[in-house]
């Protein structure tokens, strides 16, 4: 019975923290609103990298910090707010906006790329209303690249402003802890899970694809696939 309860807890935690970082061009699964990406923007310079992702369930995920040292924070949009964001994103006529904008360059000038996934928006929010005054009908994926100080078209500048507004909805305090970049599990490591429960890594599972973990303060034993550990655990507290 205890293992059944632990399994339920693990599934719930996985659902909440399923938004692990992925390359901007990677295609996520779109059959679950928790992982279906509506929009993603990445801005990178030699000093900082920021990635903003909006999911179909209203979660806004922010990765921010020096390249390779980013921390994650999460925010939530209420259903009516999410619908408003999606509506405003789809209202912009981007038919005459250049896909690649070339402005001032430099080591410290951020280069940005925003991906609008109109097909996923249609799947979860229905097709956009047909506008008789426009030939533009958003569909599929559209990608636009620009630099921070470029002169953008008015429609794209409004989309950038919308994304900046999403960033303002993120609770940055929630992302103050993450595992070290490139973390590899090791026996004896003590990790903090997203719900603040502490676990010590005991040993590999028999199939060598996961780890048996023992609760430090609670009599819990869980079995976690190795690739799930960065999704569930947010801080390395102790290493032998």
Image (cartoon, helix red, strand yellow):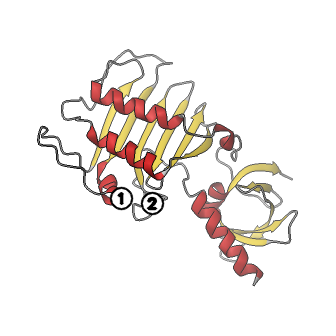
Question: Picture coordinates of residue 214 (x, y %)?
Answer: 82, 68
Q: Is residue 176 above or below residue 46?
A: below
Q: Nearer the viewer, residue 189 or 36?
A: 36
Image quadrant holding the N terminus, namely bottom right
- Residue nearest the viewer, comparing 43 with 125: 125
| Residue 72 appears in the figure | yes
Q: In the rendered view, would you say 131 is above or below 112?
A: below
**Residue at label 1?**
124
Q: Position of residue 75 (x, y in %)?
A: 57, 45
Dot 2 lies on which element? loop
Estimate the spatial distance between the alpha carbons at disc 2 and disc 1, rounded to whole Å: 8 Å
Where residue 208 sits, quadrant-wise, is: bottom right
The extreme front residue here reads: 80
> How many numbered dots are placed on residues in this image?
2
38 with respect to 140 (left or right) = right
Between 168 and 177, the residue placed more toward the observer is 168
* Position of 199 relative to 8 (above/below): above
Residue 26 seen in the current view? no
Residue at 79%, 59% in the rendered image:
197
Classify residue 167 as left or right of residue 86: right
Circle 1 packing at 10 Å, graded few (<14), some (14-19), many (20+), is some
The x, y position of residue 52, in whole percent, is 49, 40
Q: Which residue is mark 2?
A: 33
| Residue at the image point whose x is 42% and y is 22% from the top | 148
In the image, is 143 to the left or to the right of 214? left
Q: Are marks 2 and 1 in contact (CB under 8 Å)?
A: yes
User: What residue do we see at 66% from left, 74% from top?
Assistant: 8
Residue at 42%, 61% (x, y): give it.
29
């Amino acid at each position: 019975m205890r293992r059944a309860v632990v399994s339920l807890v693990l599934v719930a935690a996985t659902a909440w923290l399923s938004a692990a970082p992925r390359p901007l061009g990677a295609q996520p699964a779109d059959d679950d609103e928790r992982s279906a990406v509506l929009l993603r923007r990445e801005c990178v310079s030699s000093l900082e990298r920021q990635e903003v992702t909006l999911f179909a369930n209203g979660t806004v995920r922010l990765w921010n910090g020096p390249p390779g040292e980013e921390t994650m924070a999460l925010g939530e949009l209420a259903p009516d707010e999410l619908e408003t964001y999606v509506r405003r994103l789809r209202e912009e006529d981007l038919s005459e906006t250049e896909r690649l904008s070339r402005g001032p360059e430099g080591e410290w000038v951020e280069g940005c790329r925003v991906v609008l996934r109109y097909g996923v928006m249609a799947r979860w929010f229905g097709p956009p209303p047909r506008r008789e005054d426009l030939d533009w009908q958003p569909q599929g994926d559209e990608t636009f690249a620009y630099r921070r100080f470029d002169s953008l078209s008015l429609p794209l500048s409004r989309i950038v402003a919308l994304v900046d507004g999403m960033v303002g909805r993120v609770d940055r305090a929630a992302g103050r802890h993450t595992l070290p970049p490139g973390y590899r599990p090791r026996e004896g490591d003590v990790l903090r899970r997203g719900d603040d429960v502490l676990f010590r890594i005991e040993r590999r599972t028999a199939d060598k694809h996961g780890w048996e973990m023992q609760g430090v303060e609670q009599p819990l034993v869980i079995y976690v696939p190795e690739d799930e550990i960065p999704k569930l655990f947010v801080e390395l507290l102790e290493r032998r």
